[in-house]
Image (cartoon, rainbow, N blue to C red):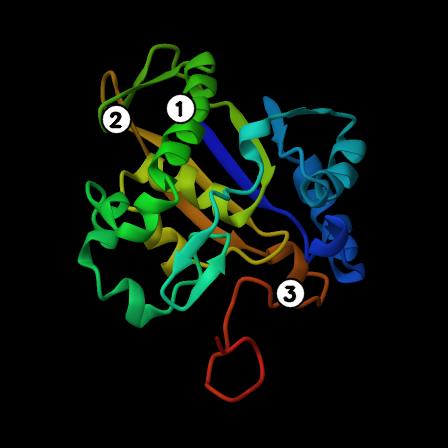
Amino acid sequence: MKLVFVRHGDPNYAIDGLTEAGQQEAALLAPRIAAMDVKEFYVSPLGRAKKTAAPGLALAGREAVECEWLREFYCGPIARPDNPASNCCWDWLPADYYADSRLLDVNHWFENEVMQKAHVKEEYDRVTGEFDKLLAAHGYVREEYIYRPVKPNEDTLVFISHFGVSSVLISHLLNCSPMLIWQGMVAPPASITTLATEERRPGIASFRINAFGDTAHLYAAGVAPAFAARFCETYGNGDRED
């Protein structure tokens, strides 16, 4: 089985839509999505994800199943050390998340006081639980840290949503702390992240990343990815320092 996670295009959060650049990204993404042999499309209920999905779905003559749990992963308020009024679990300053080694441990990240106060683990379990129900319906049943391929297949499922929630689902598939994905990986707007099952022994399947944050469709058109989700490469260059 192959799982494809698509992040929405460059967002206009004020209207829950896309910027002009985001609309261009969605248009360039469309042929790539439409060319895939997809068993089922799933989409977040939020406008920026649905607007990103629309061109590709129209080109492919397909519809997507809207899933409430694919909306962006917010538990707020997340009283991060640098921003007590934050509403997201990521974008921590490195000095803050490295100060608590629990945040990097799959079995303890949720014990951090900030995470506990915001009940992040409860929402994490709810979202990943719904995800596992869907995978079970497609033939892969979660058991501990692996999946049982009760109906092995090479189907492709496409999820068009958001960076935060995709990171949650990917961390669940890889059995690691979500902080490692939230803080250590970047999925630019309109990018594609792909995971596929590997069954090296009968009856045991695990997921492995084949590509993360792929924007080849943008580069092929001479379009650089939007800067959203990144911080400045060198301090003082004016692009999101803190």
Q: What type is the residue that disc 1 sits on?
A: Gly
The circle on residue 146 is: 2
Q: What type is the residue that disc 3 sits on?
A: Ala
Quadrant holding the N terminus: top left
Q: Position of residue 164 (x, y in %)?
A: 49, 47
Q: Label 2, label 3: how many angstroms apart (C-alpha)?
A: 35 Å
Answer above or below: position of 102 versus 139.
below
If you read the primary sequence from the N terminus, does the residue marked by circle 2 or circle 3 appear first? 2
Q: At 49% across and 58% down in the image, what residue appears? A: 86
Q: Secondary structure at mark 2?
A: strand
**Residue placed most toward the observer, 227 or 158:** 227
Mark 1 or mark 3, whichever is nearer to me:
1
Q: Quadrant location of residue 162?
A: top right
Q: Label 1, label 2: how many angstroms apart (C-alpha)?
A: 14 Å
Q: What type is the residue that disc 2 sits on?
A: Ile
Mark 3 sits on what residue?
226
Q: Secondary structure at mark 1?
A: helix
Mark 1 sits on what residue?
129
Answer above or below: position of 124 versus 29.
above
Tally the numbered discs: 3
